[in-house]
Image (tube, rainbow, N blue to C red):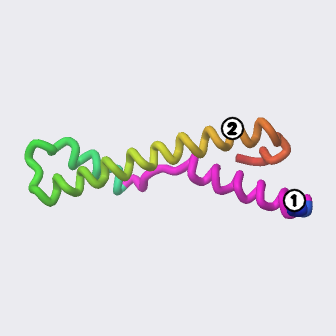
Amino acid sequence: MSAAAPAEPAWQTALEASVAALRRVAGYALDPALDQRVLELGERKEFLTPAEHQELLAWVAFTEQRALDKFTAERALRRLLALRPDLGGAP
């Protein structure tokens, strides 16, 4: 026996919330001050203290993960909107 499908308005609300969340992740950008810090550390990488080196490695890992999250969100958003273009609305 299968469970009853959720009511259409609940599905629509869930899909709209998903599109909004995917758009936020897909549009993510690092704060300019933090981006500047990463660039500054990268430019001085040969002269970093051990603490700064660890900070740079943490920033690299963070930005790589955010880039992957962005890519995944963009792809999921495209696929979802291809199936349900009516969810497109304003970006």
Q: State the residue in front, 86 or 15.
A: 15
Q: Magenta region: which residues?
A: 8-32
- Looking at marks 2 and 1 on the same chain, the residue that comes earlier in the sequence is marked by 1
Q: State the residue in front, 43 or 11.
A: 11
Secondary structure, mark 1, is loop
Residue most extreme to the front? 1
- Image check: 58 left or right of 22? left
Residue 7, x across and y down, in percent: 91, 63
| Residue tagged 2 | 78
Q: Amino acid at mark 1?
A: Ser
Q: Is residue 82 above or below residue 26?
A: above
Q: State the residue in front, 59 or 41.
A: 59
User: Residue placed at 11% from the left, 56% from the top?
Assistant: 50
- Image check: 62 left or right of 47? right
Instruction: Give the mark count.
Output: 2
User: Residue placed at 8% from the left, 47% from the top?
Assistant: 47
Residue 45, x across and y down, in percent: 15, 44
User: Residue placed at 9% from the left, 55% from the top?
Assistant: 49
Quick one: label 2, few (<14), some, or many (20+) residues within 10 Å? some
Q: Amino acid at mark 2?
A: Arg
- Dominant secondary structure, magenta: helix
| Residue tagged 1 | 2
Question: Magenta stretch containing residue 20, yes or no?
Answer: yes
Between tags 2 and 1, which lies in front? 1
Using the rendered view, name the quadrant where residue 55 is placed: bottom left
Residue 30, x across and y down, in percent: 43, 52
Secondary structure, mark 2, is helix
User: Residue placed at 33% from the left, 49% from the top?
Assistant: 61
